[in-house]
Image: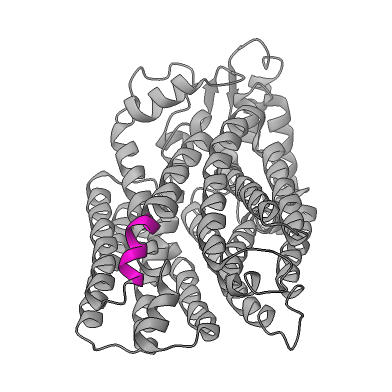
Amino acid sequence: MADAGDGRGGQGGAGRDGGGAAITTSVPARLDRLPWSRWHWMIVIGLGTVWILDGLEVTVVGNIATRLSQAGSGLHITDAQVTGLAAALYVAGSCSGALFFGWLTDRFGRKRLFMVTLVVYLAATALTALSTRSWEFFLFRFITGFGIGGEYAAINSAIDELIPSRHRGRVDLIINGSFWVGAVGGSLLSIVALNTAIFPVDLGWRLTFALGVVLGLVILLVRRNVPESPRWMFIHGRGEEAERLVADVERRIGDQTGRELPPAEGEITIHPRKSIGFVTIARTVFTRYPRRAVLGLSLFVGQAFLYNAITFGFGSILTKFFNTPSDETGYYFAVIAAGNFLGPLLLGGLFDSLGRRPMIAGTYIGSGLLLFGTAWLFSAGHLSATTLTACWCVVLFFASAGASSAYLTVSEIFPMETRAMAIAFFYAVGTAAGGISGPLLFSDLTSSGKVGDTALAFEIGAALMVIAGIVAAFLAVKAERRSLEDIATPLSAAAAPAHTPA
């Protein structure tokens, strides 16, 4: 049920969509003032659940490495190739997919690309399950990562542009944290897949990938109903479509609640543009917003190294130092993964109420200090497999909320036209740091069998996390409950300032 003020925004833009003529619209204000509804749940389920698939993918592959390398698995592949080469190719695919699809998402729209990237993921995962040669497995792991990387850029852009500003922090954190729901499922699923009393050696691992395809198809059916971002529409000269879409959502929510929506306060005038060049994107991110660029890089690199310090060698740490059977490490990882999800779930609301700066800085610094404490307890010989897992669980409870806020931060602090590409860039840097530099740094430390080396790995991850938290304490943007257009003025806005403070 649109109010009278809404109509002025729509009429102001009518007939002026083409040729770069100015469009005046209240669409952003109308989206931000919507009450939570079934429509928003549809967006969360249709877009956010893909992180569960990513968590499932990454965890399953790591946990079934021993089964893939076993004689009779149907693949001539070694343990090291699964956890090394295949993992590196998945990371490389994620980075390149994020950059490639991020650029296309800003150019051609959120909906078109979040459909394409999911199809790429589904096809590659299905082909992985059917692999009969090692090179096929490696190729399809790269393509799977390529699709997942594209998902991060397209999905985070769409979610932030469709969710009301007062809920954006909580929803974004929980959605990004849902990766660990998939990790729990992957850990438990791998335990079943490794049981040859249930599945033959050459079938169990294939069924785990097939399950990912089934879940992805369900998500695809829901995602078909998720609309294009109205914010992207009016900036790309489709103002009338954006107005109709928002008016339809308002009518549906009004019918559901039985109440009139409050008036939308605020309009914006923009000059539509079809695309933004790489030079303009780079200049915007690094010249207009240098402090925000430093913030984004710090958050992504810090969380990447902390996570690799713990998760990269967690299995070998448990088996080498505590004689934990390798087929039981999945249970320990499931506990860690549960702690990771509970962090964003329980702390997410505070990012909208207490604010971004104290919560980002607090979760980063707090998790880093807790990991320092864990390193000391470990080096002093005070921990068992159970208590070390408990320490990791507490560390990652806070670290996961912080890591999820990194995605939230880079998706809301840069202008609309650069959003997907900015997400892609910082994601690629963080993923490369964690997936390439991290293993190179931590592999020798966590596999040496020396207590001091493993404690040093913890301390390196903790130090980088604390440094990132200190950067956030000074540079984090107070974005809570603010419109995206207020946080970073669109490049297409009429009378946009020549220089925006960093």
- Say above or below: 371 vs 163: below
Report which quarter residue 18 is drawn in. Answer: top right
Residue 264 in view, yes or no? no
Q: Please report the residue visible at 47 percent of the width from the left and 34 percent of the height from the top.
A: 485
- Say above or below: 186 vs 165: below
Q: Residue 260 at x, y = what percent?
A: 66, 49
Q: Residue 101 at x, y = what percent?
A: 61, 37
Q: Please report the residue visible at 51 percent of the width from the left and 83 percent of the height from the top.
A: 326
Report which quarter residue 105 is drawn in. Answer: top right
The number of discs equals: 0
- Magenta-highlighted residues: 438-447
Q: Is residue 71 left or right of residue 366?
A: right
The one of 262 and 120 positioned closer to us in this rendering: 120
Q: Please report the residue visible at 44 percent of the width from the left and 63 percent of the height from the top.
A: 349
Q: Please report the residue visible at 69 percent of the width from the left and 24 percent of the height from the top.
A: 238
Q: Is residue 338 left or right of residue 321?
A: right
Q: Residue 71 at x, y = what percent?
A: 68, 74
Colour basis: one colour
Examine the structure image and report whether residue 170 is included in the region drawn in magenta: no
Q: Residue 395 at x, y = what percent?
A: 34, 72
Q: In what quadrant of the picture does the C terminus appear?
A: top left
Q: Main secondary structure of the magenta part?
A: helix
Q: In what quadrant of the picture does the N terminus appear?
A: top right
Residue 232 in view, yes or no? yes
The one of 367 and 94 positioned closer to us in this rendering: 94
The one of 128 and 161 positioned closer to us in this rendering: 128
